[in-house]
Image: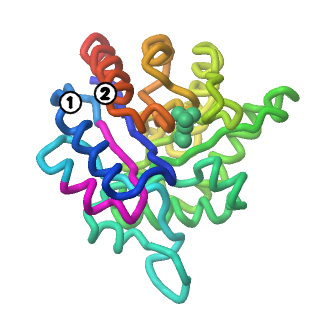
Amino acid sequence: MGRTRWVVGNWKQWGLRPAAHALASKVAAGLEAPPAGLRVGVAPPYLALDTVHAALAGAKVVRFAQDAAAQEEGAFTGEVGPAMLAEAGVEGVIVGHSERRHLLGESDALVAAKLGCALRAGMWAILCVGEPLKVRTAGRHEAYVLAQLEAALAHVAPSETGRLVVAYEPVWAIGTGRTARPEDAAAMHAAIRARLVDLLGGEGGDRSILYGGSVKPDNAGILAAAPDVDGFLVGGASKDADAFLSIVRTVAHHTKAHP
Ligand code: PEP
């Protein structure tokens, strides 16, 4: 059996509670039991977590949040720590999403602190890395992404990374309708894989590397077949239950064909 594959929906700051409940209900109703080796997850907004979890009751869906604080607790107004999320039934978090890095100003150091805090709390942690367009145009994308990866892992021990998942999300592909070509995704995933092994030893070979950036039902098949692509972090298409379920089915077929 190879590495675990994932399809995780990032619902971002969309929808009020009734809409989130309806979306989760549709996902739960349409989801076939994922094959061994595939995990499906959703990351709703914080304030919809309880209603989404109620709608997902009994469904094999990993409960994510879209962010978490860089510390367990303290005088950090507005922050929500991993223990608080765990109490609310959350099993994993997204860390370092490009919208948080580039629109909300999160630094590599803050992302590293959030990652360490989530992993030490026993959460799944999807670490997002990816280059802006001008970095790719200048041909510096690999160095840029590997520097993000190294910075994020600077303070975690290999023994703490059992629940680490990496998502390569080129910034120019997020929410734009443009996707990386499968060969470009594969090249970056191979570079990330090699650096994970350098940094984490054997653990690095086992960690899943997801692709994210305008994944839709019509491009999921070709991207899922690219070497070293272990599934997807899906934004826009995860707001449509039929589209999300179609992507899950594509990755499920792939998982069964290439366990
Ligand atoms: C994301 O938000 O992580 C993402 C990949 O978004 P989209 O699928 O809309 O590009």
Amino acid type at circle 1 is Gly
In the picture, the quarter occupied by the C terminus is top left
Q: Is residue 46 magenta?
A: yes
| Placement of 55 over or under 217, stated as above or below | below
- In the figure, residue 171 lies in which quadrant? top right
User: Which residue is rendered at x = 71% and y = 32% of the image?
Assistant: 172
User: Which residue is rendered at x = 20% and y = 39% of the image?
Assistant: 28
Residue at the extreme left of the image, as rendered: 58
Bounds of the magenta span?
40-54
User: Which residue is rendered at x = 59% and y = 60% of the image?
Assistant: 112
Amino acid type at circle 2 is Leu
User: Which residue is rendered at x = 50% and y = 17% of the image?
Assistant: 223
Q: Name the residue under label 2.
A: 245
Residue 111, image x and y in percent? Answer: 60, 59
Element on which disc 2 rests: helix
- Relative side of 259 to 159, left or right: left
Residue density around tag 1, few if under 14, some if 14–19, many if 20 or more, within 10 Å: some
Ligand 1: which quarter? top right
Q: Which mark is residue 145?
A: none
Residue 248 visible in the displayed image:
yes
Q: Name the residue under label 1.
A: 30
Pick whichever of labels 2 and 1 is earlier in the sequence: 1
Q: Do the residues labelled 2 and 1 touch (CB within 8 Å)?
A: yes
| Placement of 91 over or under 241, stated as above or below | below
Colouring used for the render: rainbow
